[in-house]
Amino acid sequence: MPWFGMDIGGTLCKLVYFEPKDLSECESSASEVETLRNIRRYLTKNSAYGKTGHRDIHLQMDNVTVKGVSGTLHFIRFPTSEMKNFLDLAKYKGMAKLVTTVCATGGGAYKFEEDFKREVNMKLAKFDEFDSLLKGLQYIDKNNPSECYYWANPTEPSKCFKVNHDFSHPYPFLIVNIGSGVSVLAVYSATNYRRVSGTSIGGGTFLGLCCLLTGCNTFEEAIELAAEGDNTHVDKLVKDIYGGDYQRFGLPGDLVASSFGQMNSREKRSKVSRQDLARATLVTITNNIGSIARMCATQEKIDRVVFIGNFLRVNPIAMKLLAYAMDYWSKGTMKALFLEHEGYFGAVGCLLQFHE
Ligand code: ADP
């Protein structure tokens, strides 16, 4: 039985741990059961993850079945840069004695394969990241009735709220996975999909630029700053150029004409705050992704676009911007959808593929 699925990305390592309800169901020996109990006790304790690791308790899925065994899925993430500490811990906790194979996907499954073997004598069963992502997405959506949602009234903050969306007949749809970079997949059936586009300007770019421009150090800090800022102090809007709307082509005055376009002026630079710069960075990156998503959707003749990836974690500003942009520019013909387990589909999907 595989217990772990890992998606080792460019920024974050996502770890999914399946905890069987009844260990005796898994044909383990008494000593294995004891070690499993220890691992379980440890992994479900909050103190387990130190300063950099987190268990997303709100995402936990109880009473699910994996390979005929019922149990709970736990969702854990830590920075990929902490991989060495993770391996030290795995060694220390005796996991290596029990778990001989870990299902892994993402670039790190290749990059760290040797380290897993050398440090903890664990073999990585490697799976393709997009196959895993789709399998995980289908599984989680099937098992969680409130997984998929959209934002109603994204343009009016006081009236904007999340609405549950029935995603049981999803095909065709576009996936826009916003991780460190961005990949766009066109999905036609459970097994038929293509990677149609991508961009290097993604979540990693947002965080990197934000750290450079504001001196912040974490994603959470960057998002908090952005929430308090105003990008119109940084960007050049259509009305800054036209004095109002550009009516002939239906461009409203409040539309950004040039991201960061005011920052060539020393005077304007002296007036912007860190918050404004963070907001402008978030808006720039998000709108660019939204625009690529829309072009891909048009080209593929697909009207449902599902945005996932950890860039959207604790990031309602970006989600609402994407929802607004998709709706506005497609004149209401395209819909932006979101999923609660935004960054974890790859890790779940590779766990499910074991022995297939
Ligand atoms: P990858 O597989 O490339 O690591 P993810 O889907 O995990 O991609 O998303 C990584 C992105 O998520 C980061 O570039 C950043 O924008 C955002 N992010 C969200 N939470 C964090 C966090 N705690 N630490 C770093 N980046 C985070």
Image (cartoon, grey):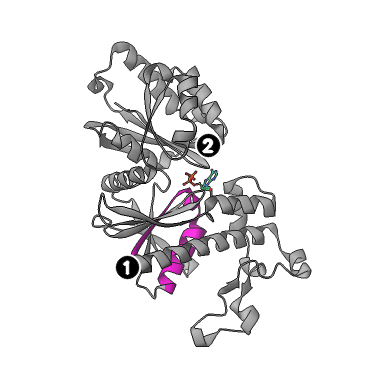
Q: Is residue 98 left or right of residue 272?
A: left
Residue at 38 percent across and 16 percent down: it is 35
Q: Residue 246 at x, y = what percent?
A: 55, 84
The disc label shown at residue 80, or none: 2
Answer few, some or many: residues within 10 Å of disc 2's Cα (few below 14, many 20 plus, some between 14 and 19). Answer: some
User: For the stretch drawn in magenta, what is the main secondary structure?
Assistant: helix
Q: Is residue 355 left or right of residue 13?
A: left
Give the residue at the far left of this rendering: 68
The disc label shown at residue 77, or none: none
Q: From this viewpoint, is residue 60 visible?
A: no
Give the residue at the far bottom of this rendering: 248
Q: Residue 151 at x, y = what percent?
A: 40, 62
Residue tagged 1: 301
Residue closer to the observer: 189 or 137: 189
Q: Quadrant of the N terminus?
A: top left
Give the foreground label among 1 and 2.
1
Q: Is residue 259 left or right of residue 26?
A: right
Marked residue nearer the N-terminal end (1 or 2): 2
Q: Secondary structure at mark 2?
A: helix
Q: Residue 306 at x, y = what percent?
A: 37, 57
- Looking at the picture, which amino acid does disc 2 mark? Thr
Q: From this viewpoint, is residue 286 visible?
A: yes
Answer few, some or many: residues within 10 Å of disc 1's Cα (few below 14, many 20 plus, some between 14 and 19). Answer: few
Queried whether the magenta region covers residue 3, the answer comes back as: no
Residue at 55 percent across and 30 percent down: it is 50
Q: Is residue 189 left or right of residue 120?
A: left
In magenta, the rendered stretch is 303-329
